[in-house]
Image (spheres, coloured by chain):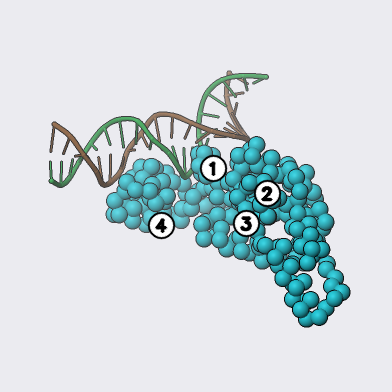
Chain colours: A cyan, B brown, C green
Amino acid sequence: MTATPTPRVTIKDVAARAGVSKGAVSLAFNHKPGLSEATRDRIFRAARELGWAPNLTARTLAGSRVDVVGLAVCRPARVLGLEPWYMEFVSGVESVLAEHSSSLLLRLVRNLDEEVGVQESWWRGRQIGGSILVDFRADDPRVGLVERLGLPVVAVGHPSLTGGLTSVWTDDATAVTEAVRYLAALGHRRIARLGGAAALGHTGIRTAAFDEA
DNA sequence: AGAGAGCTGATTGGCGGGGT
DNA sequence: ACCCCGCCAATCAGCTCTCT
């Protein structure tokens, strides 16, 4: 015996159930003005009764925003799982996005060229509304790509690396300097440091600060 | 009569599938 | 190969109704 699939509930069904137009349903669910509270309640009740949820594909089709944020990470999957920083980072991003009913589209890439292709494909295919860029390098090609595409991004990296993109960063230089000073104050004179990949911009900043300290 | 609230419904968009 | 249609939510010009 084959189960009959439940017919898909659309905004049209909700509108019919509530006795309003599709436009009114749209206004209600997007918290736009122009509807009385009574009509709004009636629409919400109808949607609950029918079990309606917005069709994200159709919403994207209509040319409105895409509630998905892209994050491409240049790491082997096995290594990524061992990096506590990334696990914390992803969970932090996810928790904020969830508050806004948005999702994270995560992709592991092998190199920067692949990431450039992925970001362009995501944006052109309207799979994302914006991206978070990490692991900046000197003369990073993503800066030019973002400007060319008009892709909204938040860059995680020092402004000296992110070329004027909206950025968030930690003060790597001060952190390293303070760590070295602290160890020196304890009497240590031979201090070693384990760093990340030399090509990464933040590694360069930390190395320079370490050498100077 | 005029203003404003509440609401309607045509239009828009990318793409796959069907028809010619 | 080309054209047309349907999918479905968002948008907004314009309509109806109520109130002053």
Residue flagged by tag 2: what amino acid is it? Thr
Q: Is residue A72 left or right of residue A94?
A: right
A129 sits to left or right of A25: right
Of residue A105 and residue A116, the one placed in the foreground of this image is A116
Position of A143 relative to A47 (above/below)? above
Badge 1 element: helix
Image spot of residue A122 (x, y percent) = 66, 43
Identify the mark at residue A49; answer none if there is no mark: 4
Q: Residue under mark 2: which chain is it in?
A: A
Residue at 81% in and 80% down: A187
Tag 3 residue? A168
Residue at point 52% right, 56% down?
A101
Mark 4 vs mark 2, CA separation in Å? 49 Å
Mark 3 closeness class: few <14, some 14–19, many ≥20 residues within 10 Å:
few
Q: CA distance from mark 1 to mark 3?
A: 28 Å
Helix, strand or loop at label 4? It is helix
Q: CA distance from mark 1 to mark 2?
A: 29 Å
Dot 2 falls on a residue whose secondary structure is helix
Left or right? Give the position of A188 relative to A6. right
The chain carrying label 3 is A
Mark with earlier residue (4, 2): 4
Q: Are marks 4 and 3 on the same chain?
A: yes
Which of disc 4 and disc 1 is earlier in sequence?
4
For badge 3, the amino acid type reads Val
What is the quadrant of residue A98 in the picture?
Answer: bottom right
Mark 4 / mark 3, whichever is N-terminal: 4
Q: Which residue is identified by label 1?
A: A60
Q: Chain of mark 1?
A: A
Q: Are marks 1 and 3 in contact (CB under 8 Å)?
A: no
Evaluate whether label 1 is on the same chain as label 2: yes
Q: Amino acid at mark 1?
A: Thr
Does A212 sit left or right of A148 as displayed?
A: right
